[in-house]
Image: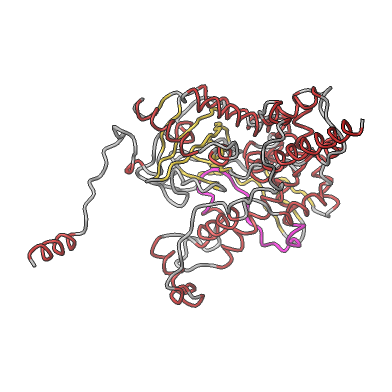
Amino acid sequence: MKAATQSLVRKAHFLGAKIKKLRKDNGLTLDDLSVRCVQRDAESAPSVSYLSMIENGKRVPSEDMLEVIASVFEKDLEWFYDEKIDHEAVTTPKKRAGGIAGVALEPSFLFSKDHLQIAIPELLSQGGISGRQFGHLLIRAHQEHHQNRFPDLEKAAEEVGQKRMPLSVEDLLDICKNLSLKIKWFDRAPDIIADPDDTGFKTLMRSFFEPPGTLYMNESLKKRPARLKYDLATHIGHTVLHGRDGLRSVSAVGGNTFDAKSWSSQSQTVDSKDILHAWRDFECSFFAGALLCPKVPSRQFLSRNAYSLQSAKLLDVTTAVLMRRMTAVSPYPHWHYFDAYPPGKLRAVYRGNGIPLPWGNLKMMNDPCQHWSVFNMLGSKSDEPAAQISVLKNGDDARLYCCESIRVKDAAGNFHVVCAGIDMGPAIESQGVSSDDVIAEIFDACQAGGGSAAVPARAAKLIRSIANILNIEWVGRGLERDANIICPRSANCPRNPCCVTKPKKVRPFTEDIRSAIIQAS
């Protein structure tokens, strides 16, 4: 009897250790795992407290319960019972910093603060980049480095909204009233702001803040509650974070909103007010997202709805707001998103996984790769979401991505495309499989197909498992279409044959002279 008891204790210990390691490796909390189990089988799913006891070796799950847990992680029951596997200490994998890799600031004396203060304004002036645009670059680098995690802003929003979700327009108006914010409505149709890149685009003045405590809101937002809620939430953020000091940009959408918001109006010097306004725009926007979609409730909501972009309608928030929140609350950190306007302009960018941009967001590119999903959707007339699996080849580096894109209309009536995606490489590696081998297999199949092809069966099986483990429905849906080879710029197209005529590489003439001198000596 004593031996049987010891065997049960040993069994419970190994089961608990394995489940805990799986959960930690996938970035899930006990609450996350319990929710995922309930989704699969509510009757057999463990509660949060019972899961905790299982992981601590105080309870042994029934076979039905273990089957539910195993289904979340795509594991066989035998894997949990196998005590021969070496059990390492349970640690959360270290997350790499997000964003594009930087450059070494060497020699360091040239990159002193004094030199940069002189060189940066000159660089921006000669490159035609405004202080506000430079501010957005700095903010994006900061955002990507921190993988869109800003706990102070989250906490400030949760204190105001009490983690309620969804918040109605009436709820937000009540918060405004409690903060002594007065609402004044104005009626103004969308205007055309001169912009050679976006000719014909309408720009709508949505709202603005007038100190000490008046919000001017466009009447048209009453017909668009999702956008009205977002604007109210950003102004609440300004009131809470910045003490309603008046240094708050106008909220506008559509045409050239960079110029519409700019203080310096293309000044040849960097205006610190522009950078301050850009930073405050970001803070208020992040606060608004955290107020409308607080971290824990939205994480559970996204899990229940498998990260569908269309599920934004269930919360009555904009698709763009939900897209941004995915990157901030998901247990999987390797996300990116784009908000693109035709013919090829990025209004919002996040690259927590270091994916290159399909085009610039400071100016138009003349050689975009036409095989990005977001590019294809810009020319689409469909309002249905589209999922795509892509191999991005950038020199010797190859990455595997999956994204979901959807065409939506902004408050000014302009169509644009929002796209959320993930880097699948880390998820593949977490399954003990070489991501390089999987990517090479898919890339070779696409090359044989002229640039696109169905994902090979072995890789497709692995990707379906990853879709289940990450609980992102559109990753699996991406397998319904051919995978595509994409690249940062079409001039460097890796397809064979190339989809564009590559420019001929010409080395400097001085190198030819150098070679001739060496050969003659």
485 relative to 207, above or below: above
Q: Residue at x 84, y 39 (%)?
A: 57
Quadrant of the rendered structure where residue 76 is?
top right
376 relative to 88, above or below: above
Query: What colouring method underlies this structural image?
Result: secondary structure
Residue furthest to the right: 1
From the viewer's side, name the closer residue of 200 and 500. 500
Residue 258 at what x, y percent from top left? 53, 53
- Is residue 260 something one can see in this rendering? yes
Number of on-image labels: 0
Horizontal side of residue 261 vs 368, given as left or right: right
Horizontal side of residue 124 vs 220, given as left or right: left
Q: Is residue 372 magenta?
A: no
Quadrant of the rendered structure where residue 53 is?
top right
Magenta highlight range: 239-258
Q: Is residue 247 magenta?
A: yes
Residue furthest to the left: 520
Residue 38 at what x, y percent from top left? 79, 27
From the viewer's side, name the closer residue of 165 and 506. 506
Horizontal side of residue 339 vs 306, given as left or right: left
Residue 278 at what x, y percent from top left? 59, 58
Q: Quadrant of the N terminus?
A: top right
Q: Residue at x 54, y 33 (%)?
A: 405
Residue 196 at what x, y percent from top left? 41, 47
- Is residue 330 something one can see in this rendering? no
Q: Quadrant of the C terminus?
A: bottom left
Quadrant of the rendered structure where residue 166 is?
top right
From the viewer's side, name the closer residue of 15 and 392. 15
